[in-house]
Amino acid sequence: MRDFPAVSTWLDAAARFAQERGLSPEHVGVLRCFAGPEPRGGPPPPPEEPWDGDFAGLERARLSESLAGIAGRLVPEVDRHQAELFGRRLQAVDTALAGLGDDVGRLLRVGLRQRAQGIASAPSARATRIRALADFYFSYAGLHLHRSSGPLGASIETLAAEVAWQAVVRGVEHAKLTGLSDLGPLHVNLLRIDPAQVRLRTEDCRAVVDRGESFESHVRARGAVAGISGGFFLYSEPDIEAPSRRFDPVGLLVEDGRVLSPPAFARGSLLVDDRGAVSIARVGPGDCELQLPSGRRLRPAAAINRAHGRQGPRARSIAVVGDAIVAVGESLPVPLNGLVVPLPDDEPSPSVGERVRYPAVHGPTGPVHMGIAGGPLLVSEGRPTLDMRREDFWGTAPPVTFSQDETGDRNLLPRLAAGLTGEGMLVLAAIDGRNFERALGMTLHDVGRLLVALGCHTATNLDGGSSKRMVVGGRAQDLTSTEIVSEGVATVSIRPVHTGVLVFEG
């Protein structure tokens, strides 16, 4: 047996236990994640906790500590409802790891608890990191559960080739992709749409939510044959300040030619022009026209958002959130969901409180009539692709669960995505997750694999998580729950849909 140096940290004790029990080094690699909150160019993580004993002693120490108090430590950053939700997810994963009843479950459970206590004791970013930690350990627990039960199923490419499409109306087909795959159990709803035979409409659904109306009933009331949830919105970010509000759209939202939310971030978007032509492309500040209070129009290609930094240039600028000017001057703080835009030298300085306008957003086929941002782009020229920095998923740009992802796209999550085939068909995929038995979820890369297998040459991610939704024929088709589902039991609650895409008969 290999000689080990004297154990000095908890990771050393875990690594020795894994080697003695013949476990894969991959499992120890899981434990190394979440060492520090800023893996992308930030400071190095703090030293690991010293531990001079063996793994059994470490396990006893961690299991003697309660996870119940962690939710309370998250409240200063998010509201109590969110804090309790994230705490329940953490508890659910811990219970599932205990139920594995093997050495991998023991190892991962110690890692989960070690990291959870460290995150909860940190000065900031506690809530978003606890949420991501629960998802990360859920992903590995779910994969191990199904791998240990026997060989996994066919590849998603094989399953995609066997999809049986059913006509909904002319130009719209629906299919389900279910069963065991090489990614674990899948439950995916698919729509294949001919844009030439239907009408697509992006919608701001916040007023629907305020009325207490479900997305499912809204789709029925509007007479749509299908609908999906749309793009990202502000949710768990700790610094949401007026005029921004929780649930505001993040990035582009265009409805009937009106720019309800400008493309503050350069991200993959689903676009429809005034002729009904559908495209998927990266759209950012330089693709929109901004009209200043003086009437002058410019393309703010040099605008600064939170992916670029937290302070604007040392030049006369305006800070804009939506259509509101919130600051004027030099070296301005960059708003969470807005831009700092340098002013031309000969432009008079506007005043705080004045409004800007966005006369047009330009896509690859012309001015955008309907559009919604998600991102990142998943497929380009027929191949899966990811470039998080190019799409402004960086720094403190919302949603921070993407911009500050510590896992390197290893979380299996509920996802929603849109792709275009070579024949011009629009494919929408609603991928369920956080369900140990029926749907673990997918990484972004594997969503790209699925859409390529379905014939897409271009595709983008849209919103996912607990607000992911697909309604077909007046009924919600997906397994949506804010909770982690284990052994068929969960207190199911549904997160409202704040923006959506509706499909109408042509």
Image (spheres, helix red, strand yellow):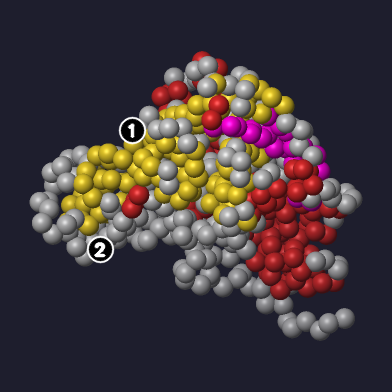
* Pointer 1 local density, CA inside 10 Å: few below 14, some 14–19, many at least 20: some
Residue drawn at x 25%, y 63% is: 313
Q: Nearer the viewer, mark 2 or mark 1?
A: 1
Label 1 residue SS:
strand
Query: Which image quadrant is residue 194 in?
Result: top right
Q: Is residue 147 above or below residue 488?
A: below
Q: What's the residue type where badge 2 is placed?
A: Pro
Q: Main secondary structure of the magenta part?
A: strand
Residue tagged 2:
313
Q: x and y percent of residue 308 in the render?
A: 37, 61
Residue drawn at x 82%, y 66% is: 23
Q: What's the residue type where badge 1 is placed?
A: Arg
| Left or right: 242 as drawn, with respect to 318 | right
Query: In the rendered structure, does residue 181 fall within the stretch colored magenta?
Result: yes
Residue tagged 1:
258
Query: In the rendered structure, does residue 414 fall within the stretch colored magenta?
Result: no
Residue drawn at x 62%, y 27% is: 172
Which residue occupies the foreground of this view, 115 or 215? Answer: 215
Q: Which residues are magenta?
A: 174-195
Q: Is residue 113 above or below residue 290?
A: below
| Left or right: 387 as drawn, with respect to 109 | left
- Disc 2 to disc 1, C-alpha distance: 30 Å
Q: x and y percent of residue 444 in the render?
A: 61, 51
Query: Which image quadrant is residue 346 in?
Result: bottom left
